[in-house]
Image (cartoon, rainbow, N blue to C red):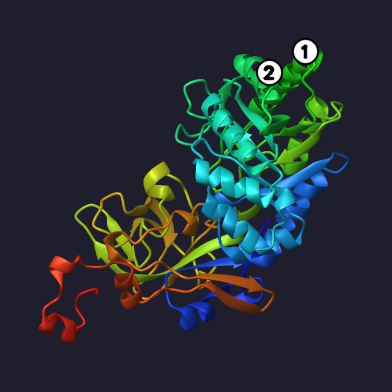
Amino acid sequence: MNHFAYRGGVLHAEQASLAQIARQVGTPFYCYSTATLERHYSVLRDALAGLDATICYAVKANSNLAVIRTLAAQGAGADVVSEGELRRALAAGVPPSRIVFSGVGKTKDELAFACARGIMQINVESEAELAMLDEVGRASGRAMPIALRINPDIDANTHHKITTGRSENKFGVEWTRAHRVLRAAKGMSGVDVAGLAVHIGSQLVDLDPFRAAFTRLRDLVTELRADGIAIRRLDLGGGLGVPYGNEGNRTPPTPAAYGAVVKEVLGDLGCALVFEPGRLLVANAGMLVSRVILVKQGAERRFIICDAAMNDLIRPAMYDAHHDILPVVEPKPGAARAPVDVVGPVCETGDTFARQRELPDIASGDLIAFATAGAYGAAMSSMYNSRLLVPEVLVKGDRFAVVRARPDYDEMLALERLPDWQEPSPAEATAGGSPT
């Protein structure tokens, strides 16, 4: 469920008109619903009731400070994968004691920063990283709590670019080597072995891979405890899929069904559990709103060319991902539909949001909205083609605020500098055409 719906013939986020926001903010822009963020968090929290559970929002899905703060106010911690994300989580008010640092390539400086902040745990993904963190911990005079991320060699049956739990993936330590690595860790004074971590991929629409991974984790905990290695915490990652509108008979399981699997397989181990949902919390809470520049009739296809592009929402180009496309002005009942390609202005054929999508009549100047765009939309955006980053807007009831402003071209150019041997000519400096 989300809080985007037609009211009086116009698409709204909660009680705020997307058309009104477009008039004030300009297009394209991202719009997020506070009510949806809060509801999604509460649904997952309720699904995990009865467990010693900490929900750490995966900041990589949407790193806007206002989004992180909205979830933190509900009790969420943060799962971060860089120093930048850690700083964002702290700035948004997430307590260090509820922050987990994941990722396969943390630098020594990043580890030192995390250790100095006293975060909950670092998920270690290799023996080399373990040795580096031990050195950092000893230098700081404290033992950093860790969870060893295992690679369980489980196929998540998701897109090959977002699966992370197979043996050929770069993530984690092969599960059969966990004993050896943890025995070594127990002898290190710079780390404190807290538990194990696992994450097998993103956008899973089947519970069986979760069940298989959790069962392997359970068996490993039993073996480790028999060998005298105490495991007090399990980080189960995230990955539960969300509906994008093209699942057919593979509708993602509910959080309640997911929670039931967790309780069935791991509920009696006596471990504290950490969860790292990202997409699940924010995807359906966001839309990308765009204005149609023009409609072009090609030799074989009709194209709707809008002012949003692949640099604003890269998922269709990168993953062949589907996003429902809605006219902001509600079509009349029974309105005829016809196949069109919805594309952006970037000079790439891959700058295509939909191919031969059945849509009602849409004309130049109309507003359209790309649904389920709150995850991996703005967070993966860029300034390709020297296009300005689009603003992000947070709605609460009938109010809205710009929570990331659109920069202007002077601000874009000011990010760069000419070397001293390329100083602008007096004419260029007067015209303002070169960065200084």
Q: Which mark is residue 183?
A: 2
Q: Quadrant of residue 192?
A: top right
Q: Earlier in the sequence, mark 1 or mark 2?
A: 2
Amino acid residing under circle 1: Asp
At 48% from the left and 26% from the top, the residue drawn is: 169
Q: In the rendered structure, find residue 292 and report the number of the disc placed on it.
A: none
Residue at mark 1 to residue at mark 2: CA–CA distance: 9 Å
Q: Mark 1 sits on what residue?
A: 227
Q: Position of residue 221 (x, y in %)?
A: 76, 20
Give the residue at x 27% y 54%.
301
Q: Is residue 329 left or right of residue 96?
A: left
Q: Nearer the viewer, mark 1 or mark 2?
A: 2
Measuring from the top left, give residue 421's x and y in whole percent: 13, 66
Q: Position of residue 253 (x, y in %)?
A: 68, 38
Q: Position of residue 91 (x, y in %)?
A: 62, 63
- Graded by Cα atoms within 10 Å as few (under 14), some (14 to 19) or many (20 or more), the crowding at tag 1 reads few
Callout 2 secondary element: helix
Residue appearing at x 51%, y 40% in the figure: 106
